[in-house]
Image (cartoon, rainbow, N blue to C red):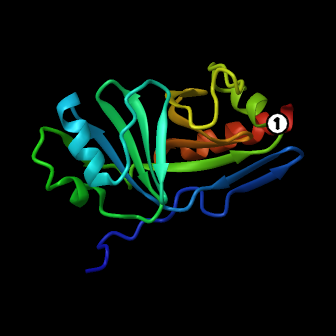
Amino acid sequence: MADPIARANALEGRFLNAEGLTLVRAEPASRLSLRAPNAAVKPLSKALGLALPERSKTSTSQGGRAALWLGPDEWLIIDENRADLVGICAPVTAFHSAVDVSHRNTAVLVSGARVEPVLNAGCPQNLSPEAFPVGACSRTVFGKAEIVLWRTGSKAFRVECWRSFSDYVFMLMEQAARDR
């Protein structure tokens, strides 16, 4: 059955390629807000096909699916293949909460030589490679919007945010790119 609600893609057509910086809307993905106690980590990891990270600021990824540690019992799962993540977790009998947030979130891919200073224009976190290496992730803020920041490469980040804040986040990054 087709999706009964046709939603416009957030940030459709938005793109910036400035000197030393590229901003582009990420392709649609499945997203899952996953909460679980320690006892459920192993069976959920097995079901998802990747180990849920158990240390702060860490992530794991495999085959287009990623798990980002957000707290001692909380992860954001992103699947670029748009898999049914709730369905994948449903057979797990260990106590957990799996909520599809695919329509709530969107993402901006930010890359280039100037990525750290541009992101630091709105994010107070230390983004140096020593403090925030490839694979690091955290829930933080950009301007006045809550985001999940994930370093996907030495000069590349994925900025996850709520769709309702995506224009604000994108425009603030555009302005920071022009000001720097």
**Most distant residue in the bottom direction:** 1
Q: Which residue is mark 1?
A: 114
Q: Quadrant of the N terminus?
A: bottom left
- Relative to 125, 175 lies left or right: right
Amino acid type, residue under disc 1 in the picture: Arg
Q: Residue at x 40, y 64 (%)?
A: 82
Q: Quadrant of residue 36?
A: top left
What x and y, as percent, mark residue 145? 52, 31
- Relative to 5, 11 lies left or right: right
| Residue 26, placed above or below residue 44 | below
- Relative to 25, 20 lies left or right: right
**Most distant residue in the right direction:** 19
Q: Residue at x 86, y 44 (%)?
A: 20
Q: Residue at x 22, y 29 (%)?
A: 38
What x and y, as percent, mark residue 88? 24, 58
For the question of whether residue 98 can be seen, the reply is no
